[in-house]
Image (cartoon, rainbow, N blue to C red):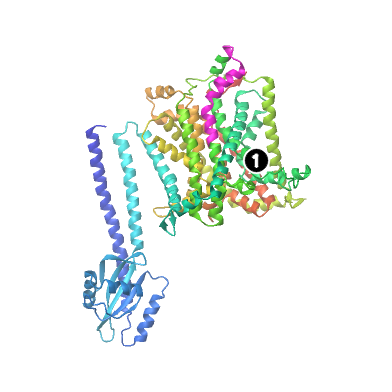
Amino acid sequence: MNKKSALNFVLTMLFVAAVGYWIFSSVRGEFFKQSRDGQRRTVETIAAGYPGLDEPEFLDSWLKRLDEETKKDYKLVFIKDIPAPNDNNFEAQGDAELAALIKYNISNSEFAKGFDNAAYEEIYRSVNNWTLSDKEHALFFAPALNSKTHDIDGVLVFAFDNSAETGFVNMLLTLFGVAFALFAVVIWQIMLSRDPIVGFALAGLFIMALIFVAYPLFEALRLSFLENGKFSLAIWKQILNSEGYMAALIGSLKLGCWTATVSTFVGFLFAFACTRTNIKFKKLISTMGVLPVISPPFSLTLSIILLFGNNGLVTRFLGLTGSSWFTIYGLPGLVLVQTMGMFPIAFLTLSGVLQAIDSTFEEAALNLSAGRFKTFTSVTLPLSVPGLLSAWLLVFTTSLADFANPLLLAGDLKVLSLESYIEVTGMNRLGHGAALSILLLLPTLTAFLVQRFWVARKSYVTVTGKPSGRVMELVTPPVKKLIAGFIFFIIIFLIALYGTIFAGCFVKNWGIDYTFSLENIYEAITRSKDALFDTVTLAAVATPIAGIIAMIAALLIVRRKFHGKRLLEILLMTPFALPGTLVGISYILAFNHAPIILVGTAAIIIINYVIRELPVGIEGGIASLRQIDPSIEEAATDLGADAATVFKSIVLPLVRPAFLSSLSYTFVRSMTAVSAVIFLISARWYHLTVLIYNFSENLRFGLASVLSTVLIIIVFGAFGIMRLLVRENENLMKNVT
């Protein structure tokens, strides 16, 4: 950047600021004129109806009637005669607070001018505002003119609430400030940036992160430091000194670590079997590997309770009812249900990573007489580290933020997400719920930073050109049978769980009345038509937006050096760690007032989907991009391709598995979201999973089963459409030999 360019930028922004100030002043002045003209007309109308002092009872009833008006935005006092300066012994009738203000400030020059103008039968508006009931008010002084004698009986003092004017000016300032900042970014990129497209992308990501991540989180944080509307540390002192809350933190960490470890292990086996072996029934394994993430998060929990609960079918069949040693409630049950529900996160992430590994490294190790196990432990597994860490982190944060499963299965185990949910919905203590949810960020950010530090110290590049289309199988037949046996055991278990949901469609009410019936299907479809349309529409809009933004963010984080990279990365990853209840409440607090009013619209739900599911796409994109040699993109750039062309024709095809995983995950999470959406839905925009939850809560499990089944069918249909629209990358296709 040279001095001439910088000078041109400064002069341009000064000109823009001058024009903006002129427009702002004009708009503000016109608004003030309209507002104050309206107030003056109100004063003239009321003053014209002044009944006079001839009949005092009429004056009293007139003042009382005006005071009782429901839509009035003013206070009124009648002062008999014209008070002299510094004389606060005048007689006043009307609003007591306004009368006290006048008596206390009688010596102020504003009041002297007001009384003088009233004496000359003129209306006067005070220059300054005055505080009444903690709000700013403008004062008007009008003559109380006797219609019979045409004498001045006194002064009518009006106090108009100016909060609307103040709010409008603040909103106007915010809008002009945002517009000026956006214009500055645009001009900066056009005049000073070497790569305007990258600059615009970075600016857009920062603006998005600040508005839809930092701002709502700030609102939640602010709540945790308020008590009765004033700053206080009482909430945090109570939480940090509470043994119960600390036990909940430890419980969350135990649950998160166990779930993340087991889920990553299961997800890796599924992904390895599908991408690095010639195991049979890959389509079935892949399908079952994503099935749990498709259904609402509480469906598997209900299935497990109905099968293995205190009075579950399996529990009763095995004679374990009332057993002192067998229970599905607590840490073991939660790890089981969360693993079944969350290992698809690891599977989707690791599938793209394993598919992108260039098999020539493994083939070279085998040709150098390394055994299959040695090749796996020294080549395949180390190159999978970015994906393994990403998968572990995503499952860990998902487990910490989950409250639907602990709500039904926690037993004696305390977890912070459930404590936060109870504080918000059960006790209506938003500050406590926000504080507990913010406390969950500490372990999440710690895991995030450790993962980033570890991955940054190593190189995982394997794609330096066209990858090999052949994969040498790394497992012996006995090991492959062992892996297949474990995978199919998981699949059979999942089929049993979902079979419970499917069977629930055809009984009157599972757990109560097992009579065969088709009534649930007709009733569920009839009652859910609007919610079904809204859910599909909102998810379909959010999916491509989240997928493209995730890949752009991953590309910039991995390939570009810029100030604030860590901050941007943390901001974009933070929503995944926040409990859905906190996100929903934060969005309501942040976007229920000017300058951004989104509550009640479809936009706030779509934005919530995009922001909440970005981390999955970003993590998958980062893990894939770390395996691609930057020289491929540099070669395209040297040949004249701009950033957009490189992204579209080079990067996106190479990270196709991660991109498709991002689209798929965003769609299914949008279709099955509960915690945040339950706060954001409105009469116009409803959600299918909230309806399923309501049916389940009211023990209408038959209706909930029908809608869960419909949800699974829709999502699988969407999977097929996405695979047709996004073609398979031939360069990454592999044949296992």
Res 42 quadrant in image: bottom left
Q: Which residues are magenta?
A: 366-393
Task: Indicate whether 267 appears above or below 206.
Answer: above
Q: Residue furthest bottom?
A: 54
Name the side, left or right, on which 510 lies relative to 606.
right
Q: Main secondary structure of the magenta part?
A: helix
Res 193 quadrant in image: top left
Q: Which residue is found at the position 55% from the left and 32% from the top?
A: 349
The image shows residue 37 at horizontal and vertical percentages of 30, 67
The image shows residue 617 at horizontal and vertical percentages of 50, 35
Task: Indicate whether 123 appears above or below 283.
Answer: below
Dot 1: element: helix
Task: Indicate whether 216 appears above or below 666.
Answer: below
Q: Which residue is found at the position 48% from the left and 33% from the top?
A: 450
Q: Residue furthest top?
A: 368
Task: Say if the magenta span includes residue 304.
Answer: no
Q: Quadrant for the C terminus, please.
A: top right
Task: Indicate whether 159 appears above or below 214.
Answer: below
The image shows residue 175 at horizontal and vertical percentages of 35, 51
Q: Residues within 10 Å of mark 1 (few under 14, many from 20)?
A: some
Task: Say if the magenta span includes residue 370.
Answer: yes
Q: Which residue is found at the position 24% from the left and 44% from the top?
A: 14
The image shows residue 84 at horizontal and vertical percentages of 22, 78
Q: How many marks?
A: 1
Residue 610, visible in the rendered structure: no
The residue carrying mark 1 is 332
Q: Nearer the viewer, residue 721 or 197?
A: 197
Q: Quadrant for the N terminus, please.
A: top left
Name which residue type carries label 1.
Pro
Residue 302, visible in the rendered structure: yes
